[in-house]
Amino acid sequence: MSDRPPLLRTLRQGRYLRLAALCLLAAAVCVMAGVWQYHRWHGKHATNAELRASAATAPVPVGDLLRTDRPLPPADRFRMVTARGTWDAAGELYVRQRQVNSALAFLVVTPLRTDDGRTLLVVRGWQAATGSATQRPATPAPPPGEVALVGRAYPSEHGGIGANLPDRQIQRIDTAAIGSRLGVTVYDGYVELADQQPDPGNLAVLPAPDLTNPAGGADEWQHLAYVAQWFCLAALALAAPFLLAVLERRDATPRLATAADLDGTEPHAAEPDGAHPHAADPHAAEPDGADPDGADPDGAGPHGAGPHGARPHGAGPHGAEPDGAGPHGAEHPEGRHGPEDPHGPQVAHVGAG
């Protein structure tokens, strides 16, 4: 039967109750973080699906999607639109410090005066930044006359166009600020050119957006990985008190005591057949007929032997003392060997009583 304390008794100890309360709190925090990441994934998945669907939708006239009195709805980003009008080359601006195909570039923003009288800001393309920050890039002029174009709609950027910048350079495509600078009414949103007729010339258009994660930020699978991570941490926090209690019980199992542990001696080696470990006589082997307890060979019983050998009738407490024998001169009966005297063997004769 195991001497280990029951698991429930271990868990009822005060230190384990405090640990359990702390682990419950940690598990609750981990669960909330996991639920939050799940909602992040759900929102990211829905947004990406809307943006992909928007990019795949057939183009619509720009006036049906963009307004001058409201911003572009987020779900309509990447939506393809069509527009007709003429380019305003005098109002062309250059957005600085943008990354295109891993290269530092200027975005070329050219106003398009549409047929309805409003102005649409169009990113006609991009030009690599090869000179100093104060140099304006040399870009091909837009074609004259009326053009028809197709492009992707984007919401306006915010924060102003920047201050103290080189001529015709801006920091952001803030449509309201650009409209104020040009003195025209512009749509609240802009378009990235995808195609135009007639041909746009040598100015490279921007590449199509990467729709694997159009909403930006962390990928969808990363949010799911965070969900799994937080829930695993919550499960580990709940299991921690039980695991620690099991390990403590295993380490606290008492070792069974042996006879050697009790008397402080080492276990004896195996003895010969029938031999007792304590049966060895420190004295030499007894001759035939000798009693191992010092009994008189002439028939004296085991209780007739004195502490120093056989004691005949009438002998003193130390045995018979022959003439001239000292008090310790008790002789050993014939045929018995006592302790060897350093002065040689002594033969004592018991006189007739």
Image: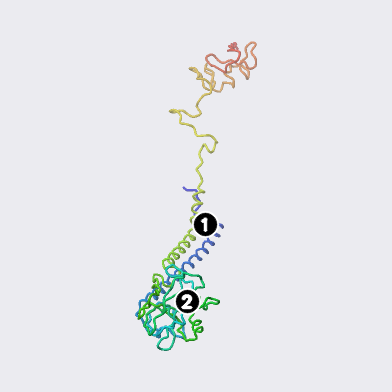
Task: Determine if residue 260 is in view.
Answer: yes
Callout 2 secondary element: strand
Residue at the location (44% across, 28% down)? 272
Residue 53 is left or right of residue 252, and the answer is left
Residue 252, placed above or below residue 51: above
Q: Label 1: few (<14), some or many (≥20) within 10 Å?
A: some
Give the Cα separation between the discs numbered 2 and 1.
Answer: 70 Å
Find the residue positioned furthest to the bottom.
116
Q: Nearer the viewer, residue 117 or 57?
A: 117
The three-letter code of the residue at mark 2 reads Tyr
Q: For residue 323, which quarter of the picture? A: top right
Residue 11's disc is 1
Q: Label 2: few (<14), some or many (≥20) within 10 Å?
A: many
Circle 2 residue: 94
The three-letter code of the residue at mark 1 reads Leu
Can you say which quadrant of the picture contains the C terminus?
top right
Residue 72, placed above or below residue 291: below
Q: Nearer the viewer, residue 322 or 51?
A: 51
Counting residues from the N terminus, which is met first, the one under dot 2 or under dot 1? 1
| Percent position of residue 259, x then y | 51, 37
Residue 149 is left or right of residue 318, and the answer is left
Q: Check if mark 2's residue and mark 1's residue have beta carbons within 8 Å.
A: no
| Percent position of residue 8, x then y | 50, 56
Q: Nearer the viewer, residue 143 or 349?
A: 143
Task: Determine if residue 43 is in view.
Answer: no
Residue at the location (51% across, 66% down)? 29
Q: What colour scheme governs how the chains and residues are painted in the rendered image of this protein?
A: rainbow
Residue 274's disc is none
Residue 78, placed above or below residue 293: below
| Percent position of residue 115, x then y | 40, 88
| Percent position of residue 334, x then y | 54, 13
